[in-house]
Amino acid sequence: MQQTFDVTRNIRKMVSPFLENYTLEQLNKIPDGYNNNLIWNIGHIVVVQQLLVYKLSGLPIMVSDEMVNKYMKGTKPEHIATQAEVDEIKELLFKTVDQTEADFNEKKFNKFQEYPTSTGFVLKSTEDAIAFNSFHEGLHVGVMMSIRKFL
């Protein structure tokens, strides 16, 4: 599992510069032909990781209900993210991965609610969810790299 956590951290290292190098206006801009923006994609990967790994394991998540409601699957940007919200997402970007690894190593994940993903994978364990999450985040990094060309 260490390699899977390392992959997730590497993905997050690819995401982090978007938060550092783009203005609030650029993070919030939805280019023509797209239905979301950079900050939505980043918030989405943070929220979905928490829902896939923690919620399906019956454990408390590290993100607020408000954040879940803004960034979970099926949502789209319906507000302009504030700098405070961007800062919160930035703080959670690595903190959530570090906590997940610590909780995994402490064997806190003891049960899991099976979940069929929209891509056809059926997650049957926390390990499945952690591995699938890397795939999911990779998809969103690809979208973000495409969006940035129009900013």
Image (spheres, helix red, strand yellow):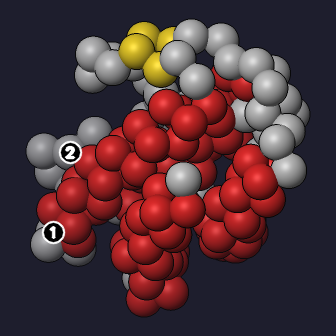
Find disc 1 in the rendering and name its residue. 150
Quarter-wise, where is residue 119 in the image? top left
Q: Position of residue 28 (x, y in %)?
A: 44, 61
- Sequence-wise, the earlier of marks 1 and 2 is 2
139 up-or-down from 20: above or below: above
Residue type at mark 1?
Phe
- Res 117 label: none
Residue type at mark 2?
Tyr
Give left or right: position of 84 versus 45. Answer: right
146 up-or-down from 51: above or below: below
Quarter-wise, where is residue 89 in the image? bottom right
Q: Position of residue 67 (x, y in %)?
A: 70, 42
Q: Count of labels shown?
A: 2
Foreground pick, 136 / 80: 136
Q: Position of residue 59 (x, y in %)?
A: 84, 30
Q: Quadrant of the C terminus?
A: bottom left
Find disc 2 in the rendering and name its residue. 34
Q: Are marks 1 and 2 in contact (CB under 8 Å)?
A: yes
Residue at the image position 82 percent from the left and 42 percent from the top: 107
Residue at the image position 74 percent from the left and 48 percent from the top: 104
95 up-or-down from 1: above or below: below
Q: CA distance from mark 1 to mark 2?
A: 10 Å
